Each structure stands twice: as C-alpha cells, then as structure tokens.
Amino acid sequence: MIIQELGWVKTLQGLIVPRMFSAFGTFLLRQFFLALPRDIEDAARLDGANLLRAYWHIARTLAKPGLIALTILTALWSWNDLMYPLVVTTDADGGIDHGGRAHGRRLRPAAAPLRPGHRLHRQGMTA
C-alpha cells in the first residue's frame, strides 16, 4: 500500500528501500555496538571529540565487521526472496512487467560478489 502511494510500483526503489531497514538489523547492530569497549569512546571524549565525532571516527570504524555481516545477510535474504519482487513488479491485470529485458543474464550466484568481504563477515559473526 505504501509503495503504491509513493509511486514505487515497478521501480528499483520499491524493491530496494523497504528491504534496507529491518528489526533484525536493528537488533544485530545494537548488540554489536553494546559489545564495543566504552573506554575508547571515553578516551575520545577526553581528547575533545564530541559524541558525533567519536561515533563517526571510532565506533563506525570498529563496527565495520558488523555492518558487513548485516549487508551480506540482508543481500542473501533478499536474493532468496521470490514473492516480494513478484508482488512489486506485477501489473494490475496480473501480468509481470519486466520491461522486455532478459533477466536471465543478470542472475549470478549470490556468493560471487560477497567473496571480498568474507574475512570481515567472519569477524562480524564471531564478535
């Protein structure tokens, strides 16, 4: 309903934006940030950094493995989901509109683009 009101039916925004935010992602990153040492933030505050600067330069850098893990998990879940893209890209008369493109060429194994981040993913899952 919301995607239709925003005019995102049959668009990339309708497929991507709703999947960017999830309760699992919020929980995973919350737990990851709670596990970060508080002493590092306190040291940054003593050095004169405000809260935003301490987050941007310290916490965000330390949370990179958690962000990579969340990105990989979200990409895999979206890759495996069939119904949502079908609902968003279906015409009103029930036909599927793919714009005449050959989608078979765009299907690639899900693991191929994730290979470079494997080490950070493993760090993020074990932290």
Image (cartoon, helix red, strand yellow):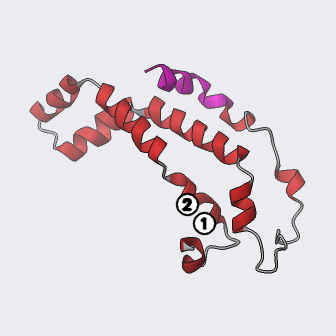
In the picture, the quarter occupied by the C terminus is: top left
Q: Is residue 106 left or right of residue 77?
A: right
In the picture, the quarter occupied by the N terminus is: bottom right
Amino acid under disc 2: Val
Q: What residue is at 10 percent from the left and 31 percent from the top?
A: 46
Q: Which mark is residue 115?
A: none
Instruction: Return the x and y of residue 115 as percentages of the image width and height.
Output: 68, 29
Question: Does 106 sit above or below residue 109?
Answer: below
| Res. 99 image quadrant | bottom right
Instruction: Return the x and y of residue 122 as percentages of the image width and height.
Output: 55, 22
Residue 35 belongs to the span the image colors magenta = no
Question: Does 85 sit above or below residue 76?
Answer: below
Q: What residue did someone put label 2 on?
A: 17
Mark 2 is surrounded, within 10 Å at the Cα level, by few (under 14), some (14 to 19) or many (20 or more) other residues, namely: few
**Circle 1 — which element?**
helix
Q: What residue is at 58 percent from the left and 72 percent from the top?
A: 3
Amino acid under disc 1: Gln
Where are the magenta residues, as a range?
A: 115-127
Q: Is residue 90 left or right of residue 12?
A: right
Decide: marks 1, 2 in contact (CB < 8 A)? yes
Question: Does 4 sit above or below residue 124?
Answer: below
Q: What residue did someone put label 1 on?
A: 13
**Circle 2 — which element?**
helix
Find the distance from the CA under tag 1 to the CA under tag 2.
5 Å
| Res. 49 image quadrant | top left
Q: What residue is at 81 percent from the left and 80 percent from the top?
A: 93
Q: What residue is at 27 percent from the left and 40 percent from the top?
A: 55
Q: Is residue 95 left or right of residue 49?
A: right
Observer-nearest residue: 59 or 6?
6
Observer-nearest residue: 48 or 82?
82
